[in-house]
Image (cartoon, helix red, strand yellow):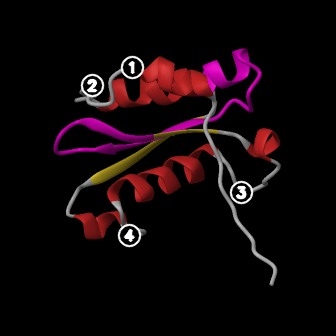
Amino acid sequence: MISFEFSFQLPEWVGELLGTHDRPYPTLDERMRLAIRLASENVSRHTGGPFGAAVFDLQRGTLIAPGVNIVVRANSSVLHAEIVALALAQQMLGHYDLSATGRECELVTSTE
């Protein structure tokens, strides 16, 4: 029997850049700055295209999941920054429907 599996991993620098996962991002400007920084770092570190995204918990003002473009790195045309951030957020919250988790989520994305 043939078995298929699909997985991906963000570049290591993303975790290093984020530091603690519970840092607050209370304003849209701060959330957008993170998306822009992810996009910029992805280019400067030669790990992907100029695209960054992040899903935030608006009530807490915290990051749920980041995303960067890893299309070339992972050989998958679907791994745009937004899709990566959404997939990781779904995994973190344990549900494919983020609205079903009871959290008000926001996707912020940038092409810097």
Neighbour tally class for label 2: few under 14, some 14-19, many 20 plus, Cα within 10 Å: few
Image side of residue 64 versus residue 111, left or right? left
Q: Is mark 3 on a helix, strand or loop?
A: loop
Q: Which residue lies furthest to the top in this view?
A: 44
- Measure how far apart labels 3 and 4 are at the Cα level: 19 Å
Check disc 2 and report the residue beneath it. Answer: 23
Residue 42 image position (x, y, % from top left): 66, 25
Check disc 4 and report the residue beneath it. Answer: 97
> Which mark identifies residue 78?
3
Residue 90 image position (x, y, % from top left): 42, 59
Kindly identify the residue that appears in the image at 43 percent across and 57 percent down: 91
Check disc 1 and report the residue beneath it. Answer: 19
The reply to whether dot 2 and dot 1 touch (C-beta < 8 Å) is yes
Q: In this view, does 14 lie above or below 79?
A: above
Q: In this view, does 64 lie above or below 43?
A: below
Kindly identify the residue that appears in the image at 22 percent across and 29 percent down: 26
- Measure how far apart labels 3 and 2 are at the Cα level: 29 Å
- Measure how far apart labels 3 and 1 are at the Cα level: 27 Å
Between disc 3 and disc 1, whose residue precedes? 1
What amino acid is at disc 2?
A: Arg
